[in-house]
Image (cartoon, rainbow, N blue to C red):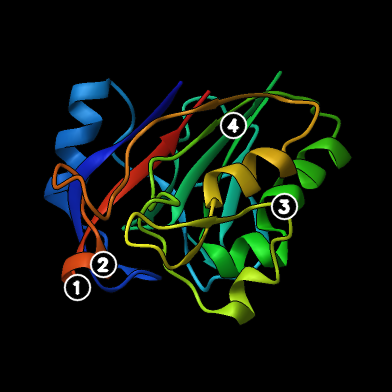
Amino acid sequence: MIVLERVGFTGAAEGDVRHDDDARRRVSERLGIAADWATVRQVHGATVHRVTVPGWAGEGDAVWTEEPGLPVAVFTADCLGVAVVADGAVGVAHAGWRGAAAGVVPALVAAMRAAGHEPGKAFVGPGISPCCFEVGPEVAELFPGHVRETTWGSVSVDLPGVVAAQLEGIDVETIPGCTFHEEDWFSHRRAGATERQVAVAWL
């Protein structure tokens, strides 16, 4: 099962989300899952952790498991939460432009495949959309074929499109929503928000 939603976890920076016990407990009770999750200290890279127990797995931006009933989670506030589902395994990745350029999503898929789990479905988003994701030329040049224009006419990148392309051969469902201009979502870029969305998955 996969959930990508606005929940209000807090952190001083996007990669340093504290375990908000009350928020996690509320989400877990509503979803009927264990209140102890496995997650990572997000660093905008491509490190992937396989986990068998809840808690912090270390620095990284993707986490996956073969353990039934163990939720795995990442937190976002403009970056994309990506969930990958295979027979007998599930994983989640935190993918901003740095993580996408580093290949965190393909790294997650490769780790699951190497363990004998072929991903069949993936879920992407929500996150900042090309309508609002203004970038400099040094970022745009990293993503040929995915350069777009913001609604105010500056250069942007279609980050959901980048990630979907990296999931080639897998059935991808992109959850619509722009965290920057849709105020139902938390956005660090728009408002310096310390709250986060969560992408949580479990078998």
- Please name which of the two marks, 3 or 2, marks the residue nearer to the observer: 3
**Can you say whether 25 is above or below 172 in the image?**
below
Spatial distance from mark 4 to mark 2, Cα to Cα? 32 Å
Q: Which tag, 3 or 1, sits closer to the chain's start?
A: 3
Q: Which tag, 3 or 2, sits closer to the chain's start?
A: 3
Query: In the image, what residue type sits under mark 4?
Result: Glu
Q: x and y percent of residue 56 in the render?
A: 46, 62
Q: x and y percent of residue 33 in the render?
A: 33, 26
Q: Which tag, 4 or 2, sits closer to the chain's start?
A: 4
Left or right, residue 122 beside residue 23: right
- Please name which of the two marks, 3 or 1, marks the residue nearer to the observer: 3
Residue designated by label 2: 188
**Can you say whether 146 is above or below 59 in the image?**
above
- Please name which of the two marks, 4 or 3, marks the residue nearer to the observer: 3
Q: Are marks 4 and 3 in contact (CB under 8 Å)?
A: no
Residue designated by label 1: 192
Q: x and y percent of residue 17 in the render?
A: 31, 66
- Residue placed at 72% from the left, 37% from the top? 167
Residue designated by label 4: 67
- Residue placed at 38% from the left, 41% from the top? 126
> Which of these two is toward me, 4 or 41?
4
- How packed mark 2 is, by other alpha carbons closer than 10 Å (few <14, some 14-19, many 20 or more), is some
Spatial distance from mark 3 to mark 2, Cα to Cα? 26 Å
Query: In the image, what residue type sits under mark 3?
Result: Gly
**Which numbered marker is on residue 145?**
3
Quadrant in the rendering for residue 160: top right
